[in-house]
Amino acid sequence: MADKNNTKLSIKKLLLPAILVLAAFVLSGCSTWSSFRETFIAEPQSDTDPSITIGVIEPQTGRYADKGKDEIKGIELANSIYNNVDGYKVKLVKVDTQSTVAGTETAIKALTEMKPVAIIGSAGEASSLTIGEYLDEAKIPAITPAATNPLITQNSVYYFRACVTESQMGEGLAEYAVKELGSNRIAVVSLKNDSSVSALLEGFDSRIKSIAGKRSRAVAMTKEISPSEDEMKEVLNGILRNDIDVCFVSMGAEEMDIFFTMAEEMGLDNVTFLGTRIWGDPAFISMMENHKNIKVVFPYESVLTKNDDTSDTYTEEAQRFQIEYANRYGADDTPTDNAALAYDSYLLLINAFHNAKSMEGEDIRNAMLDFDGLKCATGLFTFDENGNVVRSVTLSTIKDGKPVTEYVTKTEAEAKELEDLENIVSEDSAS
């Protein structure tokens, strides 16, 4: 039996490169890929050929290192494919924020002195907030792949964002709950003194009222709790009493493991549970192996099922990303949304450089603002005047231990500007 399994494993290892090569060959016939190749791919350049530099500022050490390294993987993958723009070789210069504000300040000062044409980063809300003022002073356009704090782009002329904001995510979850699931028995459960989801919940509430009317009672239950077992049980009893069929919960993997265990014991595995973007993290996905009958849906830019996506957001670039990612990092390495969004961040910058025909920061910034549905791996990109992406929201679920696309909103969500800045709290600035 062992020899038979080893033979199958050997055949699988031999077949994978062939499948990837064949898929890449098929892609090369696509019009989108042909256009990208004609514009951005050229023969290998010599040392004397001109080059441009894109700065990469990410946490490579410290508490956010995993997210930073994921984004670097996406950036380096994109650079390996599209490493030449209009005859200019694209070089990457990476600096480490060390997952702290002080480290970020040191890194961004060093990076801006190198005068890159653009910058990608950073993972971590506080780090991205710190970077903004330095970008404006140096007039260098930058894009954060996955930081969601609205102030990042609102307070900086040169900062863009590849992901949607928390308020946009909330709108997407509301549309899914009311329009796709047809629910009018929704529960909202949040943690006491947790302002991190305030923007999401505002977007959620706003979208429900716009769909069902301002006097809608679609949200039948609202509760703030401490993550104790007694309060979790009280909430679950309320879900049972109120015949709730959709429940938003803002807790992490450890707490949700307890919560879902209780829900299953009470026969509530027919409820669809909505959550935050962190539900796409490996720790949460691993935890869900214990709760395979529970349906979870959360905002996440999964590219893993774009092949089955019939919406306009699907592009050939999504398939290319999957193929090239597996080819570079191995078929067992599942790409995160941070990696996919960082990949797209690189594509956005080189397209802007190509369209601007200039190395001036203002010209590249204006070219970014001129994008009208540019197709990348995670979808179509159009930016508002503050550098926020205006797009449909992608929601994912978990199947076979991976985050896969569950729903793409039918309407595009626009980021909201903050009027009350005191309501927004980033991670500890001393971290």
Image: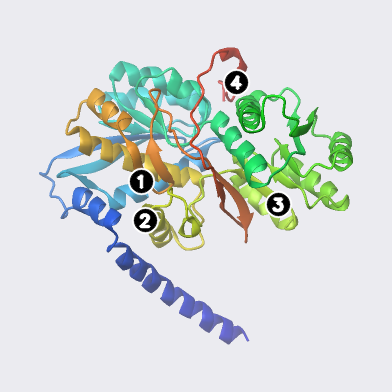
Q: Which of the two residues, 207 or 90, is positioned nearer the viewer here?
A: 207
Residue picked out by circle 3: 295
Determine crowd level at label 3: few under 14, some 14-19, many 20+ residues with C-alpha closer than 10 A. Answer: some
Q: Are marks 2 and 1 in contact (CB under 8 Å)?
A: yes
Task: Pick out the residue farthest to the left.
Answer: 48
Whether 32 is drawn above or below 366: the answer is below
The residue labelled by disc 1 is 375
Q: In the figure, residue 105 lies in which quadrant?
A: top left
Q: Residues within 10 Å of mark 4 (few under 14, many from 20)?
A: some
What residue lies at 52% left-to-right and 42% top-to-bottom?
410
Whether residue 72 can be seen here: no
Q: Quick one: quadrant of the C terminus?
A: top right
For discs 3 and 4, the disc positioned in front in the rendered view: 3
Which numbered disc, 2 or 4, marks the residue that appears first in the sequence? 2
Q: Is residue 4 above or below residue 287?
A: below
Q: Which residue is mark 2?
A: 316
Residue shown at 57% from the left, 23% from the top: 426
Q: Position of residue 245 (x, y in %)?
A: 77, 45
Q: Are marks 2 and 4 in contact (CB under 8 Å)?
A: no
x and y percentages locating residue 174 in the rendered image: 63, 36
Residue 425 badge: 4
- Between 380 and 334, the residue placed more toward the observer is 380
Which mark lies nearer to you, 1 or 4?
1
Type of amino acid under label 3: Lys
**Separation of residues labelled 3 and 4 (CA atoms):** 30 Å
Q: Nearer the viewer, mark 2 or mark 4?
A: 2
For the residues marked 2 and 4, what is the alpha-carbon distance in whole angstroms?
38 Å
